[in-house]
Image (cartoon, grey):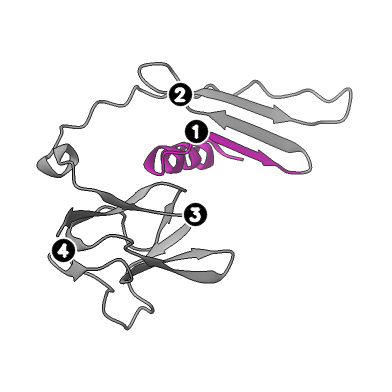
Amino acid sequence: MEFKDIKSIVDLMKKNSISDFELEKEDFKIKLHRTDGNKTDNVQIQNYLPPGTLQPAPIPVSEQPATETPKTESTVTKDPEIKSPMIGTFYRAPSPESDDYVQVGDHVNADSVVCIVEAMKVMNEIKAEISGVITEIVAENASAVEYGQPLFRVRPA
């Protein structure tokens, strides 16, 4: 595995708020663990080689502490969130050719389908479970989402 591949995994972990990642192949194993705050990330890379074979020096991976993003009005609001009930891929529409289920400003009720989360090739319709107006679409279309990750913000009606 090349350094750029490891860097890509670290970037994906940051983007999707994943704290642990582990990959093991026949002769290669990598464990990544991210921490909060100003602590550095912990990376362990192990190559399994036959005895007597020289092992290459470990690749140092250093990450700069993430700078705090400025709080925008949407992150300060206390609007209730529609959260992902599972890990999967978030889709705003039932198909690429279809219109999105909801847009900012749309009124939804508890039974309104607001998106799909695909998990293991199964398309799961996600309902709002709250009545109100969509104030923000938090998740990016076709992106990976985690359990409990906010997808939408809703101003109760």
- Label 1 and label 2: CA atoms lie apart by 7 Å
Q: Which residue is mark 2?
A: 35
Foreground: disc 1 or disc 4: 4
Report whether 78 appears left or right of 118.
left
Spatial separation of the CA atoms under disc 2 and disc 3: 22 Å
Identity of the amino acid at label 2? Thr
Q: Secondary structure at mark 3?
A: loop
Identity of the amino acid at label 1?
A: Ser
Q: Please tell me which of labels 4 and 3 falls first in the chain.
A: 3
Q: Earlier in the sequence, mark 1 or mark 4?
A: 1
**Residue 29 lies in magenta, yes or no?**
no
Q: Position of residue 25 (x, y in %)?
A: 73, 43
Residue linked to disc 1: 19
Q: Residue at x 38, y 42 (%)?
A: 15
Please state the horizontal and vertical placement of residue 122, each as a whole percent of the image. Answer: 55, 70
Q: Which mark is residue 104?
A: 4
* 14 falls in the magenta region: yes
Residue underneath mark 3: 86
**Stretch in magenta:** 1-25
3 or 1: tag closer to the N-terminus: 1
Dot label at residue 44: none
- CB of mark 2 within 8 Å of CB of mark 4? no
- Gap in Å between the C-alphas at discs 1 and 4? 30 Å
Q: Measured from the top left, where is residue 35 in percent x and y?
A: 45, 23
Does 69 appear above or below 121?
above
User: Which of the two marks, 2 or 3, is nearer to us in this view?
Assistant: 3
Pointer 1 with pointer 2, Cβ within 8 A: yes
Amino acid type of the residue that numbered disc 4 sits on in the rendered structure: Val
Residue 86 higher or lower than 103, as above or below: above
Which comes sooner in the sequence, label 2 or label 3? 2
Farthest bottom residue? 97
For residue 45, side relative to residue 105 (left or right) = right
